[in-house]
């Protein structure tokens, strides 16, 4: 998956991030302009446009509520609405959705990770995090937005050796420490 599309996505995402930040000149073009003593002028219309689009997304946010089906208990729908609002507030979901939206506009992909976290409670709480789109390796044959239709999806991240020791084992960490100094 990494070699069949993800690496190209990461290169494109890096280029899009640079354009968004206003770094829109190629190094060779900057060198040529410097050689002939001309300035490299950048008028960043991308940041202004994306900021406008993001403002529209914030202004038009949807309010999620539950409604009972015919014959269902309306109190259940009311409780579900309140539970969802509590989960949203605990996770600052409005901010996460806006950040994910911006990633989708700039990089073409944005992801949220929703899990049950048992760090604060034995019963667990819903924890929602925004993922770095460059760290999510999706099925290279995926042709649908729905992750349930993907054959593969991986979330990658760099770990320190101490993190590896805590998450896996001292033996694994010691093995990697030995690899650190080998050729």
Image (spheres, rainbow, N blue to C red):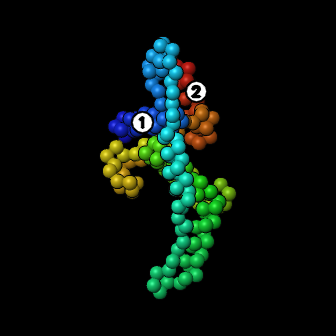
Question: Is residue 64 placed above or below 106 in the rendered structure?
Answer: below
* Residue drawn at (55%, 29%) of the image: 176
Question: Is residue 60 placed above or below 151 in the rendered structure?
Answer: below
Q: Can you say which quadrant of the picture contains the N terminus?
A: top left
User: Residue 119 appears at what percent x and percent y?
Assistant: 65, 54
* Secondary structure state at the residue bearing disc 2: helix
From the viewer's side, name the closer residue of 121 and 109. Answer: 109
- Kindly indicate whether the residue at mark 1 contacts the one at mark 2 (C-beta within 8 angstroms): no
Q: From the viewer's perspective, tell me whether residue 152 is left or right of residue 56.
A: left
User: Residue 34 appears at what percent x and percent y?
Assistant: 50, 16
Name the residue tied to disc 2: 177
* Residue drawn at (38%, 54%) of the image: 145
* Secondary structure state at the residue bearing disc 1: helix
Q: Quadrant of residue 180?
A: top right
Distance, label 2 to label 1, CA atoms, is 33 Å
From the viewer's side, name the closer residue of 161 and 79. Answer: 79
From the viewer's side, name the closer residue of 65 and 53. Answer: 53
Label disc, if present, on residue 12 of the rendered structure: 1
Question: Is residue 93 placed above or below 85 in the rendered structure?
Answer: above
Residue 43 appearing in the image: yes
User: Residue 69 appears at what percent x and percent y?
Assistant: 46, 81
Residue 100 appearing in the image: no
């Amino acid at each position: 998956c990494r070699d069949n599309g993800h690496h190209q996505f990461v290169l494109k995402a890096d280029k899009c991030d640079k354009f968004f930040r206003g770094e829109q000149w190629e190094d060779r073009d900057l060198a040529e302009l410097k050689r002939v003593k001309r300035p490299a002028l950048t008028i960043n219309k991308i940041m202004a446009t994306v900021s406008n689009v993001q403002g529209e997304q914030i202004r038009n946010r949807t309010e999620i509520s539950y409604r009972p089906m015919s014959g269902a208990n309306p109190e259940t729908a009311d409780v579900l609405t309140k539970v969802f609002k509590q989960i949203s507030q605990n996770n600052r979901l409005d901010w996460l959705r806006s950040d994910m939206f911006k990633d989708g506009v700039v990089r073409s992909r944005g992801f949220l990770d929703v899990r049950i976290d048992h760090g604060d409670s034995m019963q667990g709480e819903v924890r929602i995090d925004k993922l770095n789109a460059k760290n999510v390796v999706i099925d290279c044959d995926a042709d649908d937005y729905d992750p349930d239709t993907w054959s593969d999806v991986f979330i990658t991240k760099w770990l320190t050796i101490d993190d590896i020791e805590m998450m896996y084992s001292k033996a694994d960490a010691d093995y990697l420490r030995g690899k650190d100094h080998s050729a």
